[in-house]
Amino acid sequence: MSFTFPSVSITGTGLFTPPESISNSELCASLTASVEKWNAEHADEIAAGTLVERSAPDEEFIVKASGIESRYVMEKSGVLDPDRMRPRLETRSEDQLGIQAEMALPAIRDALAQAGRADTDVDAVIVGCSNLQRAYPAVAVEIQDALGAEGWGYDMNVACSSATFSMQAAVDALRNGSAKCVVVVNPEITSGHNNFELRDFHFIFGDACTALVLERTDDAEADGVGDRAHRWEVLGTKLATQFSNNIRNDFGFLNSSEVDDREPHEVIFRQNGQMVFREVCPLVVAHITDHLESLELDATGVRRFWLHQANLKMNQLIAKGVLGRVPDENEAPVILNEYANTSSAGSVIAFHKHRADLDAGDLGVICSFGAGYSVGSVIVRKA
Ligand code: CO8
């Protein structure tokens, strides 16, 4: 007996872009001031060889190594203050909406408008992101409450791959009938966990929030709501993980119980960027190639790749590995020049901004990858 899974579609997408942007030159100026101050304050230890002098950043290096020109953040003045080097976020009372729920709502409402659905049509909310503001109550449950929605919600974290991992969770829920209208939302405030004091990390990340609405295709068709031009059928999802310490964040519940004190920057984001570059690119190429093959699809038939936005060279290498030639920007659109690496939001920002020009029947691949390591792909076809 064979069983056919019900078809699921993405029926809408939305994006919240924070109002404040930081250019590379602003970022380099504040880090240079901070480095000079730090080196002066630690001159004796540096002279004694017990501390290593910190190096100043270089704008040209950033663009050449990553393709990043600017990034949006939820709060700019604190990041650029050489005496602070991290955002200055107001402490909110329990009666106030949390900052992640606040950035999620406009993105979700954009996505619901495309899908032709109301807040109360939602019956499941999955928050997938690298940087959750608290352990509990789940941000997803707070969002569910703010929407006035019923059903259920939960938070999940698979770093940058949280977008595609949460999309697969949504597809599974829709196929097995545990939800009818799922919102997947990626509220990333990476600036709260980036190390702006070290030149190796300060330029990499930005803040943003993306949202997707997923429903069974027959529900969307039967109800006749939403704009069909925004609808993309999910042909398949594929996830993979492989343990690595090359991207790591040790912030957690046990920090205060540890016997040895660690420096604050030891328990936020850190990575060995070169190793990540070298190890993740071939993993992603093989992953997308296998996924397409499993659906009997040829890479040359894929009209667009919406890849995780961490590094321009990385994306060019991955698209080249899959296609056998260097892709043009139309085939693998870039948003990281403006947004930097927004972790789980990156591939969805690319999908949100760069799909309206495609035709019915066109194929595309949404792919995210990052810490874990983790890789996820979602193959879609325009309705
Ligand atoms: N200005 C000047 N020089 C610099 C700067 C700078 N801003 N940054 C580094 N350098 C220096 C280095 O110190 C080094 O100097 P030296 O040779 O004297 O030691 C030199 O430049 C070369 O450094 P790298 O070898 O590190 O340079 P790369 O060419 O490898 O470029 C990149 C660095 C851009 C980071 C690159 O390696 C890269 O993009 N790798 C892929 C990384 C990636 O994709 N990571 C994914 C992380 S995201 C994720 O999955 C987790 C989510 C986390 C959420 C966010 C929380 C904050």
Image (spheres, rainbow, N blue to C red):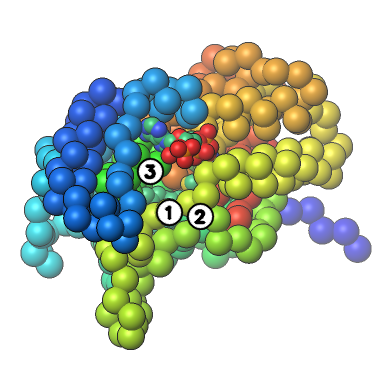
Tag 1: amino acid = Arg
Outermost residue, right side:
1
Say which of 198 and 71 sits in front. 198
- Give the secondary structure at mark 3: loop
Front residue of 298 and 383: 298
Disc 1 vs disc 2: Cβ atoms closer than 8 Å?
yes
- Above or below for 73 versus 29: below
Kind of residue sitting beneath label 3: Phe
Q: Earlier in the sequence, mark 1 or mark 3?
A: 3
Read off the residue under disc 3. 201
Picture quadrant of residue 367? top right
- Compared across the picture, whether 76 is left or right of 209 comes to left
Q: Position of residue 212 (x, y in %)?
A: 45, 42
**Does the beta carbon at disc 2 come under 8 Å from ligand 1?**
yes
Q: Which mark is residue 270?
A: 1
Mark earlier in primary sequence (3, 2): 3
Rendering coords of residue 81 (x, y %) = 12, 40
Earlier along the polypeptide chain: callout 1 or callout 2?
2
Residue where numbered disc 2 is placed: 247
| Pointers 3 and 2 in contact (C-beta within 8 Å) | no
State the image coordinates of residue 148 (x, y, percent, origin top left).
Answer: 27, 57
